[in-house]
């Protein structure tokens, strides 16, 4: 897996990602302490609102950035996002009002919503080989899991030496280092969407507005069968991660009556399960299809919810702690089975000129799922009890998994024969096409774009303009 780090550009980008994640983790800890200083006992509601603001920023900003990203230098967009995050981190220690926290959190997360999809879209250009890209995805998954374990430990160590305000300084240093590493990397030139759009417009007489481009990524998801299935799988993952993120402390402290020191142990079990799968998947995906791995992850999620229901229903027994750790590790493993191959799926399904929009759509739509499941896990668990929260979210994961199975055809080739019925015979796209009674027929790697508006069905048509 580590062989991809021999690529100097990817090494610098991966290091930038890891350092930025560590900085984000420090900011998360410091933000909680800042909220407590400002709001006291109401700190929980402040953080809950801040989390909702974060999700709203992700859902709304990412598609807009995806629409204009192909017009901007990618290096400038990445570095600019990092510098905005540096500025916010340096301002946070000086706030003394709750509304100021909310405003700065929105700006911080808006910058992250610009950085992350752009960063994700660069990696396939840096590592075009499928085998290398798969290993990069696994390393990225490991980076996220390690951040969830390492950042709290680093924050605890720093807090024994300095006040929490200095954690924001550490966050700023992390984002500055990320920007410097991006500057030092030689990014490959992307396929320019502007040239493609101009050439298409010559034959179609049409162009798209920025608003139209903002919806391109979303339309790609809703018209490509495997990406429609990914939408459902995102919801299944969000159901599981919401239980872990929101209710771990409730399970450990209230339901099992254990000490606060056991909360990070439980969260660590989730991270360990995810990391174990991320380490194994590169070799597995060399032999097994993305569809099999990701749908198997959805099945595992449902099975773990069933087991968690039994743990939740039990009133006593020392075995419940071990069972909870096993359930959290299995949740982590199942989520990693779904999330790690996601980049491969998007790269297969998006035109080169639309990758940033596609990754932005995945970023936005997946966080929309969390915006639904986080409140459900918290509010239902608090009002009706953990058992009902497990039942509701488990049913959500089951329904989402079944929907994904239905939406994702078992036969899912990249190259698909199809028929164009509305393109001029002189159109350059038809250079290798054969004349048919209804139009022009040819085969190529099929993605939804300006010339292919719908997914082929029998009889296989792909109307052009």
Image (cartoon, rainbow, N blue to C red):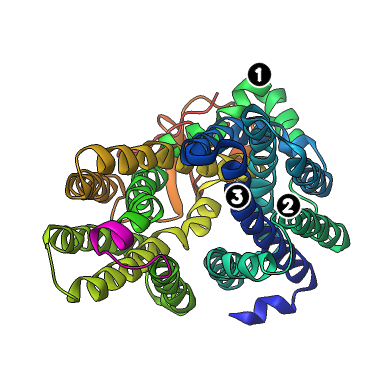
In this rendering, which labeled residue sits more in front, label 1 or label 3? 3
Reading the image, the residue beneath label 2 is 165
> Which quadrant: the N terminus?
bottom right
Q: CA distance from mark 1 to mark 3?
A: 53 Å
Chain-order first, disc 1 or disc 3:
3
Chain-order first, disc 1 or disc 2:
2
Mark 1 is surrounded, within 10 Å at the Cα level, by few (under 14), some (14 to 19) or many (20 or more) other residues, namely few
Q: Quadrant of residue 295?
A: bottom left
In this rendering, which labeled residue sits more in front, label 1 or label 2? 2
Callout count: 3
Kindly state the secondary structure of the residue where label 2 is placed.
helix
Coordinates of residue 273 in the picture (x, y in percent): 39, 72
Mark 2 is surrounded, within 10 Å at the Cα level, by few (under 14), some (14 to 19) or many (20 or more) other residues, namely some
Q: CA distance from mark 3 to mark 2?
A: 9 Å
Reading the image, the residue beneath label 1 is 206
Coordinates of residue 233 in the picture (x, y in percent): 35, 50
Reading the image, the residue beneath label 3 is 33
- Please state which of residues 160 and 416 is positioned toward the viewer in this rendering: 160
In contact (CB < 8 Å): disc 3 and disc 2: no
Query: Residue at horizontal 35%, vertical 71%?
Result: 329
């Amino acid at each position: 897996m580590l062989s991809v780090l021999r690529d100097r550009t990817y090494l610098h980008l991966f290091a930038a990602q890891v350092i930025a994640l560590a900085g984000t983790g420090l900011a998360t800890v410091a933000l909680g302490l800042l909220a407590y200083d400002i709001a006291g006992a109401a700190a929980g509601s402040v953080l809950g609102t801040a989390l909702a603001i974060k999700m709203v920023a992700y859902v709304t900003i990412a598609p807009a950035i995806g629409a204009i990203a192909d017009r901007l230098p990618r290096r400038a967009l990445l570095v600019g996002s990092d510098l905005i995050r540096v500025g916010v981190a340096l301002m946070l220690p000086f706030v003394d009002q709750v509304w100021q926290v909310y405003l700065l959190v929105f700006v911080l997360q808006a910058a992250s919503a610009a950085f992350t999809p752009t960063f994700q879209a660069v990696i396939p250009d840096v590592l075009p080989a499928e085998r290398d890209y798969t290993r990069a995805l696994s390393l990225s998954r490991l980076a996220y899991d390690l951040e969830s374990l390492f950042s709290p430990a680093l924050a605890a160590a720093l807090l024994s030496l300095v006040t929490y305000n200095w954690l924001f300084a550490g966050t700023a240093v992390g984002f500055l280092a990320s920007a410097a590493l991006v500057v030092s990397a030689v990014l490959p030139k992307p396929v320019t969407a502007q040239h493609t759009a101009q050439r298409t417009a010559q034959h179609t007489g049409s162009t798209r507005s920025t608003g139209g481009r903002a919806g391109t990524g979303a339309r790609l998801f809703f018209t490509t069968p495997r990406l429609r299935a990914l939408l459902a799988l995102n919801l299944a993952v969000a159901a599981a991660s919401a239980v872990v993120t929101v209710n771990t402390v409730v399970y450990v402290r209230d339901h099992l009556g254990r000490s606060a020191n056991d909360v990070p142990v439980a969260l660590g079990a989730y991270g360990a399960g995810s990391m174990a799968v991320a380490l194994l998947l590169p070799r597995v995906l060399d032999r097994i299809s993305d569809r099999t791995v990701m749908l198997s992850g959805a099945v595992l999620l449902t099975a773990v919810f069933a087991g968690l229901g039994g743990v939740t229903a039990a009133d006593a027994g020392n075995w419940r702690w071990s069972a909870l750790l096993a359930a959290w590790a299995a949740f982590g493993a199942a989520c990693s089975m779904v999330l790690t191959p996601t980049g491969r799926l998007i790269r297969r399904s998006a035109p080169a000129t639309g990758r940033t929009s596609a990754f932005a759509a995945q970023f936005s739509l997946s966080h929309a799922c969390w915006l639904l499941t986080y409140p459900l896990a918290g509010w239902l668990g608090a009002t009706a009890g953990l058992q009902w929260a497990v039942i509701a979210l488990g049913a959500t994961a089951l329904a989402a998994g079944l929907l994904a199975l239905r939406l994702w055809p078992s036969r899912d080739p990249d190259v698909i024969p199809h028929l164009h019925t509305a393109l001029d015979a002189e159109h350059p796209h038809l250079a290798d096409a054969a004349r048919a009674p209804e139009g022009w027929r040819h085969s190529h790697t099929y993605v939804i774009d300006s010339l292919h508006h719908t997914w082929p069905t029998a009889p296989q048509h792909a109307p052009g303009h």
